[in-house]
Image (cartoon, rainbow, N blue to C red):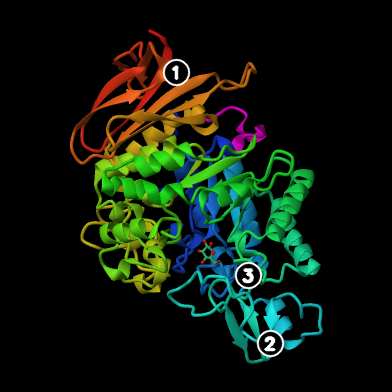
Amino acid sequence: MSFTAPIPIIGASHVPGLRLDPDWHRKSVFYEVMVRSFVDSNGDGFGDFQGLTSRLDYLQWLGIDGIWVPPFFQSPLKDGGYDVSDYQAVLPEYGTIDDFKHFVSEAHARNMRVMIDLPINHTSDQHPWFLASREDPEGPYGDFYVWRDTDEGYPNVRIIFVDTETSNWAFDSVRRQFYWHRFFSHQPDLNFENPAVHDAVYDIVRFWYDLGVDGVRLDAIPYLYESEEGNGESEPATHQFVRDLRRMVDDEYPGRVLIAEANQWPAETAEYFGTAEEPECHMAFDFPTMPRIFYSLRAQNASELQRVLAEQVEVPPGAAWGVFLRNHDELTLEMVSEEYRQAMYGWYAYDPRMRSNVGIRRRLASLLDNSRAELELANALLLSLPGSPFLYYGDEIGMGDNIWLDDRDASRTPMQWSPDRNAGFSTADPGKLFLPPVQSLVYHYTSVNVEAQMAQASSLLNWMRSVLHVRRQHPVFGLGTITVLETDNESVLAFVRSYGGDGTYHGPKEEHVLCVFSFSHNPVHVTIDAPDWSGAALHDLFGGGQFPTIADDGRFSLTFGTQSFYWLHIGSQA
Ligand code: BGC
């Protein structure tokens, strides 16, 4: 099967007017894809923009509205491209600026948005700014980084990459001073106390918005500023910088968005939305909910998830969470208690090789032991949460990982398109590939691949596509509020997503959907309390089947098979 030919779109109904819609980011399902991992169009062993562009039809067929591409800039690739040495050049292995522009226009032609990723907290130590800074302290770049004579400053700041780093300071033998780095020592932090750094960052942001991108992910945003007293995370000056940047984006690029990568506790993460009067980012990744989903699956207990969702801070108008199960990083366990962390290591990272820093470097399917029931349950929950879902490439077919590769490369292997050589990813000599495709017993590319799953109506890929298309028919999932309900079974999570309608003729209509998930590993019967909905009729969102009406006292009962869910339309009183 050729993936270069357009794949017919069966039943894909895009939300009308998405391109002009100021709420587009709240109605979208995003797909994270690392350029080097998707499709190699020229046989050099690296994925590239021409390859990615050739599979936009696949993403459209799947039901994707936006694509997030992690850094694809010039880089020594010591941190997957998050170590940038030129922010305004495409890494030659990935193509050219023209290839990028073509990719953006082809995505737009399919009604898909493009979100890029800007690591502005730090650069590569190969960036010309750093080379100049270390050589000429008095020159124009002398103050671009955070230099000190000793390695004693900022004592309260934690180390993030605990597997490789022992200090946030590193000695530079040229300048004979220490420089500050929050991540790898080859990634010196930019000095945001220097206004010239702000100007340089604004130039980069404008450069990419001018090329037509729709959104920018602000990588590692909490770490821009540090202070002697603070812990170097979300310092007031960092929020001020984000507020100023937002004002610039709203003034010069209305309709484009910023998304915060802030791996923080719930209240601190929510601060990256700012307020209605002083907004910061349009979106922020929801780090606290994600690990609690994995916890609930194994603990068969939804109470912690219920608590987090019930306490979820309301976002300012127009803002949205970005929800996800997995991404290109380890499944971070930084934002859970020590007790939860140890439990999750025991369940999900029983082999020490599966761990990375404070987290687990595995893919969704292998975390869930390839259980179809768990994959459906986890994905359905993801697609029901308040916010816009971000899928990670390959998870739609249940790709596995390779824990024998270094660090997070374990889950950045080539996309598995077909059972052919190199999984259909590349025509290169297999030894030339940037990473080998997965060849493990369970997840080998000869059995787990797009072509095979397209040929099987009941495959995970086809299930994902159907669920995405059902979700698309119900804007309540993107726009609605959440009300968590009480249940009499601790393994069952129930909530109502509600949208009051926007009052316009073309806008989405009022809608209420009850989402219920059973994490139990056995069948269960549950009674749910929905006091606001007494007498309401319930219908299954997939097949339309009628369920028992909610009783006058607001209670109703449901029976679940093992690890399953319902999406039920709440209709007017029966
Ligand atoms: C990215 C990582 C990267 C780190 C340092 C993160 O937040 O997601 O992949 O290693 O920033 O740039």
Query: If the image is split into quadrants, where does the C terminus sit?
Result: top left
Of the two numbered discs 2 and 1 on the same chain, state the one appearing first in sequence. Answer: 2
Tag 3's secondary structure? loop
Q: Which mark is residue 557?
A: none
Q: Is mark 3 within 8 Å of ligand 1?
A: yes
Q: Residues within 10 Å of mark 2 (few under 14, many from 20)?
A: few
Q: How many marks?
A: 3
Q: Position of residue 203 (x, y in %)?
A: 76, 61
Tag 1's secondary structure? helix
Q: Which residue is mark 1?
A: 532
Task: Tell me where the magenta segment starts and ends, as one range.
Answer: 12-24
Seen from the viewer's position, the closer of residues 257 and 238 is 238
Magenta stretch, main secondary structure, is loop
Q: Residue furthest front?
A: 229
Residue type, mark 1 in image = Asp
**In the image: residue 44, left or right of residue 198:** left
User: Mark 3 against mark 2, which lies toward the viewer?
Assistant: 2
- Asked whether residue 553 is in view, the answer is yes
Q: Residue furthest top?
A: 574
**Looking at the rendering, which quadrant does residue 187 occupy?**
bottom right
Seen from the viewer's position, the closer of residues 565 and 88 is 565
Q: Which mark is residue 122?
A: 3
> Is residue 443 on the magenta stretch?
no
Q: Residue furthest left?
A: 522
Q: Residue at x 55, y 40 (%)?
A: 313
Whole-number angstrom distance, CA of label 3 to CA of label 2: 20 Å
**In the image: residue 542, left or right of residue 181:** left
Residue type, mark 3 in image = His
Of the two numbered discs 3 and 2 on the same chain, state the one appearing first in sequence. Answer: 3
Q: Which residue is mark 2?
A: 149
Q: Position of residue 376 (x, y in %)?
A: 31, 40
